[in-house]
Image (cartoon, helix red, strand yellow):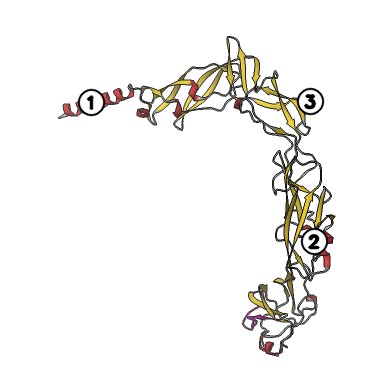
């Protein structure tokens, strides 16, 4: 019986050894502790090694030798220097030691840009982005498609991956100037000697324009203050309702979307007449107005469609909310009793004070509702009277320091508005 068990164990070990010698890396899954490599391609200093350029052998924790698929090996992202480089290896996610990668010294670079189809446009100066959170670029990203860079070294030459190279304009060149034959320098990291090729930086022209309006922009026909009953050109596109309005954007060939100030060659059409101002539009008895504008400058492409429109709603101002301020609400008091008083005295006097003010859609200051009625008295209000009340308003069983919640109800011009409010009760003054 013991002999049978031993034979079975030996058979299992032989099967494992045969599988390991079968050069299948999957048989050593999770057991490879160390990796060696044969470098199959020459590298030059400045490149980053990739696993596909090596033949890997793994050594398991059981002492077996297995061939590894390079697809399962990851090499350290390391820029090589001249000579032997120690590079860390990961096999199937686990640390597998290091290998040595040899890199040759670069003796020269050459660039073939004949297959490049990249088009570059000059960057803009003094422009304001019309896209929130998107800055106007001051430089361009290089499109290296079709660019072939060859590095020479002692004994040969090789094409270097563009991902391992640094592309930059030569020191005398600028992105913001249209110019033929702009010099581009190509370098390997750590090398001052560069190869060069030339690109054309084209004039960046407007390829389309668009009329728009700031978010939720409307004209209020019955608001006279701050010009909110008249058309305005937006002075700020994002976040400042006091500078809201219509505006024109220009999309350039380089991709920039730019806000045009009204003085940047923007003009309007009223009827059949051009050269008009926003103030020339008639707004009375309208529910909306269509603004027609065009770009009349010389920065557009040939055939630019330079005219566009935008519709702006015209409406009467309206109440969107209530603003409530309360001070010195007294514990032990029932404000819902008939004849209860809320005085207009200042809070420093110790009197209970409420201010109930409508919040207007135009953001204009609303007029506070002066008349308070206790809950039991609301039937006494005139049909056309503006007033406010609140409920629940009975705090007879509450003590000072307690936080309470109630709803303020305001009747303004026959319409009812509500607002939930919290406050902390105070003790009655002695």
> Quick one: label 3, few (<14), some, or many (20+) residues within 10 Å?
few
Q: Residue at x 71, y 38 (%)?
A: 254
Helix, strand, or loop for circle 3? loop
Q: Quadrant of residue 390?
A: bottom right
Q: Which one is in front, 235 or 50?
A: 235
State yes or no: residue 51 in magenta.
no
Q: Is residue 78 toward the left or the right of residue 409 in the image?
A: left
The answer to whether residue 30 is above or below residue 232 is above
The answer to whether residue 281 is above or below residue 389 is above
Q: Residue at x 70, y 48 (%)?
A: 131
**Mark closer to the observer (3, 2):** 2
Q: Earlier in the sequence, mark 1 or mark 3?
A: 1
> Quick one: label 2, few (<14), some, or many (20+) residues within 10 Å?
many
Q: Earlier in the sequence, mark 2 or mark 1?
A: 1
Q: Is residue 352 toward the left or the right of residue 97 in the image?
A: right
Which residue carries the number 3 mark?
Answer: 172
User: Which portion, as a residue range, is magenta?
Assistant: 389-402
Q: Which residue is drawn at 39% across and 31% down?
A: 30
How far across and down, in percent of the image, does residue 76 sit? 54, 27
**Mark closer to the observer (2, 1):** 2
Q: Is residue 281 toward the left or the right of residue 212 in the image?
A: right
Res. 136 visible in picture: yes
State yes or no: residue 390 in magenta.
yes
Q: Earlier in the sequence, mark 3 or mark 2?
A: 3
State the mark number for residue 231: 2
Which residue carries the number 1 mark?
Answer: 11
Q: Which one is in front, 86 or 135?
A: 135
Q: Which one is in front, 26 or 99?
A: 26
Res. 213 visible in picture: no
Spatial CA span between label 2 and label 1: 93 Å
Spatial CA span between label 1 and label 3: 75 Å
Identify the main secondary structure in magenta.
Answer: loop
């Amino acid at each position: 019986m013991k002999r049978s068990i031993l034979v079975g164990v030996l058979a299992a070990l032989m099967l494992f050894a045969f599988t390991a010698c079968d050069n299948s890396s999957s048989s050593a899954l999770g057991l490879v502790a160390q990796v060696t490599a044969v470098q199959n391609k020459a590298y030059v200093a400045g490149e980053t090694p990739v696993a596909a350029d090596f033949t890997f052998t793994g050594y398991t924790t059981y002492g077996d030798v297995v061939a590894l698929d390079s697809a399962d090996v990851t090499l350290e992202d390391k820029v090589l220097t001249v000579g032997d480089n120690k590079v860390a290896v990961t096999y199937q996610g686990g640390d597998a030691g290091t290998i040595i990668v040899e890199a040759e010294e670069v003796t020269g670079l050459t660039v073939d840009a004949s297959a490049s189809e990249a088009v570059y446009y000059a960057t803009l100066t003094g422009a304001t982005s019309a896209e929130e959170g998107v800055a106007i670029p001051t430089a361009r990203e290089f499109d290296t498609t079709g660019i072939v860079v060859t590095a020479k070294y002692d004994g040969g030459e090789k094409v270097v991956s563009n991902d391992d190279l640094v592309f930059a304009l030569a020191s005398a060149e600028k992105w913001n100037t249209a110019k033929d034959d702009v010099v581009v320098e190509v370098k390997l990291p750590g090398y001052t000697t560069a190869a060069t090729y030339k690109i054309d930086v084209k004039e960046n022209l407007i390829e389309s324009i668009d009329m728009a309006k700031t978010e939720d922009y409307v004209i209020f026909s019955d608001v006279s203050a701050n010009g909110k009953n008249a058309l305005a050109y937006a002075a700020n596109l994002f976040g400042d309702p006091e500078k809201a309005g219509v505006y024109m954007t220009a999309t350039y060939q380089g991709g920039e979307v730019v806000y045009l100030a009204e003085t940047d060659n923007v003009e309007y059409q009223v009827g059949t007449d051009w050269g008009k101002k926003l103030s020339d539009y008639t707004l009375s008895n309208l529910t909306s107005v269509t603004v027609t504008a065009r770009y009349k400058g010389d920065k557009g492409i040939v055939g630019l469609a330079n005219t566009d429109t935008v519709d702006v709603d015209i409406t009467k101002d309206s109440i969107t909310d209530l603003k409530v301020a309360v001070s010195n609400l007294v514990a032990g008091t029932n404000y819902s009793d008939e004849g209860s008083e809320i005085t207009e005295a200042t809070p420093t006097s110790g009197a209970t004070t409420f201010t109930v003010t409508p919040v207007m859609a135009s953001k204009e200051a609303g007029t506070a509702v002066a008349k308070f009625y206790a809950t039991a008295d609301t039937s006494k209000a005139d049909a056309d009277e503006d007033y406010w009340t609140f409920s629940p308003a009975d705090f007879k069983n509450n003590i000072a320091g307690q936080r309470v919640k109630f709803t303020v109800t305001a009747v303004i011009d026959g319409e009812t508005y509500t607002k939930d409010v919290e406050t902390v009760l105070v003790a009655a003054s002695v």
